[in-house]
Structure formats: C-alpha cells, structure tokens
Image (cartoon, rainbow, N blue to C red):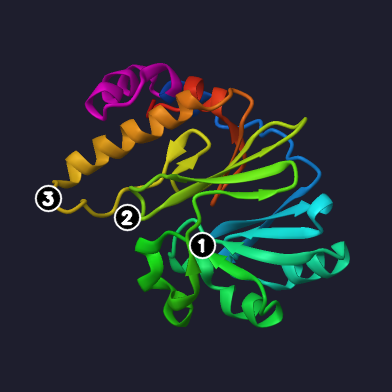
Amino acid sequence: VDEAHLALLAPTLNLKTAPLLSIATSPNISAPALPKNLRRYSSAFGDMTVNAYLLEVPEAEQALLFDTGTDASAIIKSIATSGLALTWIILTHAHPDHIEALPEIRAKFPNARIMAPLTEKAGLGKFAGEVNAPDKLDFGSTSLTPVSTPGHSPGGTSYLIQSTGVPDLLICGDALFARSIGGIRQSAPGETLKQTYHKNLENLKSLLESLSGETILCPGHGPATTAQTEQIENPFF
C-alpha cells in the first residue's frame, strides 16, 4: 500500500485520511454480534450477496422481515420453525436485489402487510397498491421508527428498532455500509448530482450523531457495524 499517495488522494475525494489508510492497511472488519432475535440471510445476486433480516418479537407473537433478498427458502423455514406470525414485510428500497423474493414470500404469507417508502412504490410492481407507510410501529416493548435515508435510492428508508435491555438496531439497506456508504445514482429534482450527494451525506452524518454509539447498523450488503465504529472508521464521515 502506497500510504503517501493515499494521503494525497483522500482530500481530493473528500475522504478522511486516517480511516482511508486504515482500510487499506487493515481491511478486515470486526463485526458486532447480532442479538439472538435478529437473523441475517445472505443470498446471491450476480457477483455479490444481499442481506435480509428477520426480527422475532416473541412477546407479540410476531416476526418482521426486512427486505427479502433473492432466496426465500431459509427465511420461510425460519418463520415456520419460530411459530411466529410474519406480520410485516418491511422494505428499505425497491432495487431488484432487495425485493426479488417478495412474490414468493408474499404468496407463502398472504396476511403479511408490506411497509415501504411511498416514493419507491413504482418499483414494487403488483404490490404497489398494498404499500403502507406508518410513522411508527409498536410491538410490546419493541418499537420501530422509519428514518429517511435517501441517496442510493430516492426514497431509501432505514428502520430504527428499539427494545428494552438490548442495543438499538438500525436496518439501513444500502444507505450505510461498514466503512462506506451506498452509491448515489441520481440527483434529486432541481439539484445537481454533487448537491444531492453532499446533502445526503450530511443527512447520514447527522443520523449517526443522533444514534447511541452501541447502535448496531445492519446494512443491505456486507457485515454489521456500529454507529460509533462508523464515526471513527468510515472515511466518508
């Protein structure tokens, strides 16, 4: 690794030098353990993998699915084994890798409601008319709050999960990754791509600062991380 050249490159890319050098010299990521009631399912999509998450809420006898990935089989088996009712399929955005298994899962659990950003409805095909977008959901001592995180997708939304006695969780789709962020593909109306990028970057920075450092971030690709880790190790912040 040519650390001198990286140090010169970082400011040009508006990246923080120390975290960028750390990624280059120590690429391995130490991911936090997920709580026992949250399961991650990684499925293949082209040359990458995509994550879906199943949150079990036994006190409410419910399970919540966040995104679907591309393979429904393990998810369906886990729900059946848990004995819980899948009541919500909750989508961070409508890119194909995150919703490919939606038709199969919805067919297996027809009573599950679909929660997604309203601005992502067009990408949901026949499910567009079923989209719900509540401001908050409560399941006993567990609450779920949508948080707007556009950029990678115009309506991209993360979901903050808070439960008594355990660290907060943020299901963040493709907004945030361990040591990185999701690519911003298009500008918002009336803005240049650069303006949209900087606005959404500031939104993510503010979000991280508002979270407890122990909050576990669960991205759509790659390993989990924490809010504190990203504030220190993510070169974008």
Q: Secondary structure at mark 1?
A: loop
When asked about the image quadrant of residue 154, the answer is bottom left
Residue 5's x, y, as percent? 31, 22
Magenta span has 105?
A: no
Disc 1 or disc 3, which is closer to the eye? 3
**What amino acid is found at the position of numbered circle 3 in the picture?**
Gly
Label 2 close to label 1 by CB (< 8 Å): no
Q: Residues within 10 Å of mark 1 (few under 14, many from 20)?
A: few
Tell which circle, 1 or 3, labels the residue nearer the N-terminal end.
Answer: 1
Tell which circle, 3 or 2, labels the residue nearer the N-terminal end.
Answer: 2
Q: Which residue is mark 3?
A: 190
**Residue 46 visible from this viewpoint:** no
Residue 52's x, y, as percent? 62, 58
Q: Residues within 10 Å of mark 2 (few under 14, many from 20)?
A: some
Q: Which residues are magenta?
A: 1-19
Horizontal relation, residue 210 to residue 30: left or right: left
Q: Which residue is mark 1?
A: 47
Q: Residue at x 77, y 30 (%)?
A: 165
- Residue nearer the viewer, 30 or 121: 121
| Majority SS type along the magenta span | helix
Q: Residue at x 24, y 54 (%)?
A: 186
Magenta span has 5?
A: yes
Quadrant assignment for the C terminus: top left
Using the numbered discs, state the Cα–Cα distance from disc 2 to disc 1 in whole angstroms: 24 Å
**Residue 198 visible from this viewpoint:** yes
**What amino acid is found at the position of numbered circle 1 in the picture?**
Asp
Residue 154, numbered label: 2
Against 213, residue 47 (above or below) is below
Q: Secondary structure at mark 2?
A: loop
Using the numbered discs, state the Cα–Cα distance from disc 3 to disc 2 in whole angstroms: 13 Å
Tell which circle, 2 or 1, labels the residue nearer the N-terminal end.
Answer: 1
Label 3 close to label 2 by CB (< 8 Å): no
